[in-house]
Image (cartoon, helix red, strand yellow):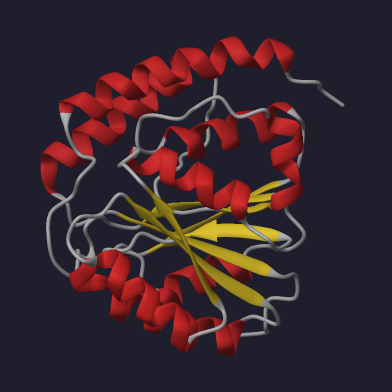
Amino acid sequence: MIPFAPSLTIVIPAYNERDNLSRVIGDALEFCRRACRAFELLVIDDGSSDGSPELLADLARASPELRVITHARNRGLTGALRSGFYGAANDFVTWIPADGQIPLPELGRILDAWAEHDLVLSTYRQRPDGLVRMVMSRGLRLMLFAITGLRDRLEGVYLFRRALLGELQLVSDRSAGAIGFEIAVKVRRLGRRVGTTEIECAPRLSGRSKVANARNIAQSVGEMWRIRRSLRHLRRP
């Protein structure tokens, strides 16, 4: 793998993931030191109550490439990603979950697919989450197309130019995944270059998903309508 040339921020949102953090952060540091010319890891502790803040403080003291932003209360995945994306210091931004479901070699596939794109999306070859999660994902994808017109599949993590955030005027702040949909919709609307690649998804290292539930689905639909209304204010080239 040729080292990724632009500077990179990897955001890691984490809510009560203490059992997974040391391994995920250690793997990410090892990967980035090999695969990136300049990078930082930015962990968003999203109001954890399991001892994660203390562990993260220890890890940050040992690794100068690691920064931590702490939320006083839980804001959900999109809230954590907002803090990470806007807090990123480097040219490009991507993210990985703190549960280990995106192995670092798969992130390498996204970096390899960059090729001067403004946004790189990823889809899963196979996701080991069962029938219910698959049905939920397909249903949300159909609703997203109906409401916003987005045809792209966005299932995994993504990579984008940090400078785009000044143009996109992001409105999503609640449901898990909504901020990724919004970025994709608006980057397409602006006519920027979008690439895609396929990655593998691994089982969680430990614990349960905190986003696969009916409440998040309802919030996602509301966020889609907010995204649609905000498109009228987006300045096309």
Residue 113 location (% of width, % of height): 62, 64
The quarter of the displayed image where residue 49 is located: bottom left
The quarter of the displayed image where residue 223 is located: top left
Residue at coordinates 49% horizontally, 36% vertically from top-left?
A: 179
In this view of the protein, which residue sits in the foreground, 66 or 11?
66
Residue at coordinates 39% horizontally, 81% vertically from top-left?
A: 59
Q: Is residue 65 above or below residue 227?
A: below
In this view of the protein, which residue sits in the foreground, 145 or 237?
237
Q: Is residue 58 left or right of residue 228?
A: left
| Residue 18 in view here | yes
Q: Is residue 45 left or right of residue 29?
A: left
Residue at coordinates 74% horizontally, 61% vertically from top-left?
A: 91
Quarter of the image where the C terminus is located? top right
Quarter of the image where the N terminus is located? bottom right
In this view of the protein, which residue sits in the foreground, 209 or 134?
209
Q: Is residue 179 above or below residue 233?
A: below
| Residue 202 in view here | no
Residue 166 location (% of width, % of height): 75, 37
Residue at coordinates 73% horizontally, 42% vertically from top-left?
A: 164
In this view of the protein, which residue sits in the foreground, 184 or 20?
20
Residue 95 location (% of width, % of height): 48, 58
